[in-house]
């Protein structure tokens, strides 16, 4: 073989070797690309895994507490005192006490008084939704129209009628209200006529309650 032929053969061999090397590199790159998952595929897989975990958590989680009317504050509600209203009075304000004594233990004079003969309906400053009824100068009844004040036994404004029935089971008598169509009066009173009366609207929600002694406790309007 002449020298020129040998040179041409060498060049051809080098070209073929280079082409073989390029083909091998291309195949390796393709195999590597197949080995690495696409970013979109990774995101999809992660999302599917998160959804599965959430579904599993929802299946085993406890159900959320259903909102109750009891949890909902009424507009204009008075701040909740620590005492409760019951058959004997409101905290240290006892039924049968004279007005001056009640004002003393309540740490303030009453205002907004309305009077019918010897009967007065009044309230403390800033608390028009808690009405004190005095007859012949003595405290006989307290009317409450705010969920911020609790009755003895746990009842309060905003409760559903079935909650009241449960709290005072075996103690209640019920009768229709004359002043609210569909409303009820639920009475928990003793043989002397003292105790509690809860009033509901037509939807069975307690809108007010009162505590006191007879005969003032049974008067729908208080003084009449």
Image (cartoon, rainbow, N blue to C red):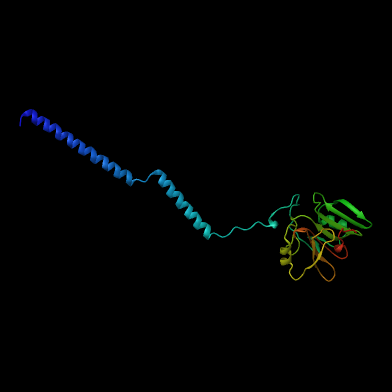
Say above or below: 7 vs 53: above
Instruction: From the viewer's side, name the closer residue of 63 and 70.
Output: 63
Residue that protrudes farthest toward the left in the picture: 1
Whether residue 164 is visible, yes or no, is yes
Say above or below: 160 vs 10: below
How many discs mark residues in the rendered view?
0
Instruction: From the viewer's side, name the closer residue of 142 and 223.
Output: 223
- Answer left or right for 49 relative to 112: left
x then y, percent, for residue 129: 80, 53
x then y, percent, for residue 75: 74, 50
Q: What residue is at 23 percent from the left and 39 percent from the top?
A: 23
Say above or below: 4 vs 138: above
x then y, percent, for residue 156: 74, 59
Whether residue 87 is visible, yes or no, is no
Residue that protrudes farthest toward the right in the picture: 117
Q: What residue is at 50 percent from the left and 56 percent from the top?
A: 55
Query: In which quadrant of the rendered image does the C terminus lie?
Result: bottom right
x then y, percent, for residue 99: 87, 57
Instruction: From the viewer's side, name the closer residue of 188 and 101.
Output: 188
Query: In which quadrant of the rendered image does the N terminus lie?
Result: top left
Q: What residue is at 81 percent from the left and 66 percent from the top?
A: 175
Say above or below: 75 vs 219: above
**Picture quarter containing residue 155?**
bottom right
């Amino acid at each position: 073989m002449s020298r020129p032929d040998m040179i041409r053969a060498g060049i051809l061999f080098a070209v073929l070797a280079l082409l073989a090397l390029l083909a091998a590199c291309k195949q390796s790159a393709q195999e590597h690309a197949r080995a690495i998952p696409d970013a979109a595929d990774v995101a999809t897989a992660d999302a599917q895994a998160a959804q599965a975990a959430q579904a599993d958590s929802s299946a085993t989680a406890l159900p959320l507490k259903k909102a109750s009317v009891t949890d909902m504050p009424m507009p204009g509600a008075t701040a909740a005192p620590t005492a409760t209203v019951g058959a004997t009075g409101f905290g240290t304000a006892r039924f049968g006490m004279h007005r001056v004594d009640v004002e003393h233990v309540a740490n303030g004079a009453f205002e907004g008084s309305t009077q019918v003969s010897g009967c007065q309906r009044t309230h403390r400053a800033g608390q028009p939704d808690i009405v004190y009824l005095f007859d012949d100068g003595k405290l006989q009844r307290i009317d409450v129209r705010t969920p911020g004040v609790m009755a003895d036994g746990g009842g309060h404004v905003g409760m559903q009628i079935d909650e009241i029935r449960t709290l005072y089971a075996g103690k209640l008598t019920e009768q229709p209200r004359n002043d609210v169509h569909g409303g009820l009066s639920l009475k928990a009173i003793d043989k002397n006529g003292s105790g509690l009366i809860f009033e509901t609207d037509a939807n069975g929600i307690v809108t007010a309650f009162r505590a006191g002694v007879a005969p003032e406790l049974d008067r729908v309007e208080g003084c009449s």
